[in-house]
């Protein structure tokens, strides 16, 4: 059974940092692109970052470039999102998702087959 579980969210002050984790079970991450998305209340789901099968091929939304870093540890079957210099506009539920085996990163959420339940990130003073 394919399962993705996000963790690491929480409340942080502007300028702070968080590291999100996306732990996979039921399959090996090695052969799949993994994306991070976020969704704020009343807004559409937005692509934040993605890591391709061939590391270190990564992609970032313009809004997070230079602040967020995505990485994967295939031995732990986990993908991470290090988020620095967080701002109130980063507040959202963050979700990880896997794309089809052997495919590439795409920003369209419809490309992704399986999703985690999400972890809340709140940036506020």
Image (tube, grey):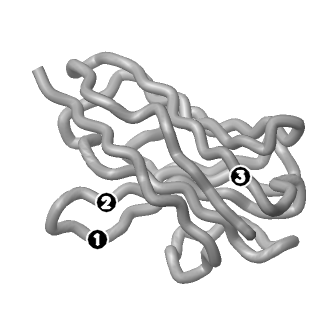
Q: Which residue is mark 3?
A: 24
Q: Position of residue 90 (x, y in %)?
A: 28, 41
Secondary structure beneath label 2: strand
User: Residue 44: which disc?
Assistant: 1
Is there a contact, CB below 8 Å, between mark 1 and mark 2?
yes
Is 2 or 71 nearer to us in this picture? 2
Quadrant placement of the C terminus: top left
Question: In this rendering, is residue 39 above or below 60?
Answer: below
Residue 67 shows in this picture: no
**Residue at 28% of width from left, 49% of height from top?**
92
Q: Which residue is mark 2?
A: 39
Mark 1–mark 3 Cα distance, whole angstroms, equals 25 Å
Secondary structure beneath label 1: loop
Of pointers 1 and 2, the one earlier in the residue sequence: 2
Is there a contact, CB below 8 Å, between mark 2 and mark 3?
no
**Residue at 58% of width from left, 37% of height from top?**
21
């Amino acid at each position: 059974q394919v399962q993705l579980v996000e963790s690491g969210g929480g409340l942080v002050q502007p300028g702070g940092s968080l590291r999100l984790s996306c732990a996979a079970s039921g399959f090996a991450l090695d052969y799949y692109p993994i994306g991070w998305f976020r969704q704020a209340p009343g807004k559409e789901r937005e692509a934040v970052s993605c890591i391709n099968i061939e590391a270190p091929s990564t992609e970032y939304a313009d809004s997070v470039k230079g602040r967020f870093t995505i990485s994967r540890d295939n031995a732990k079957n986990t993908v991470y999102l290090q988020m620095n210099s967080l701002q109130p506009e980063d507040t959202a539920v963050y979700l990880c998702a896997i794309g089809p085996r052997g495919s590439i990163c795409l920003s369209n959420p419809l490309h992704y087959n399986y999703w985690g339940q999400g972890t809340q990130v709140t940036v506020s003073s």
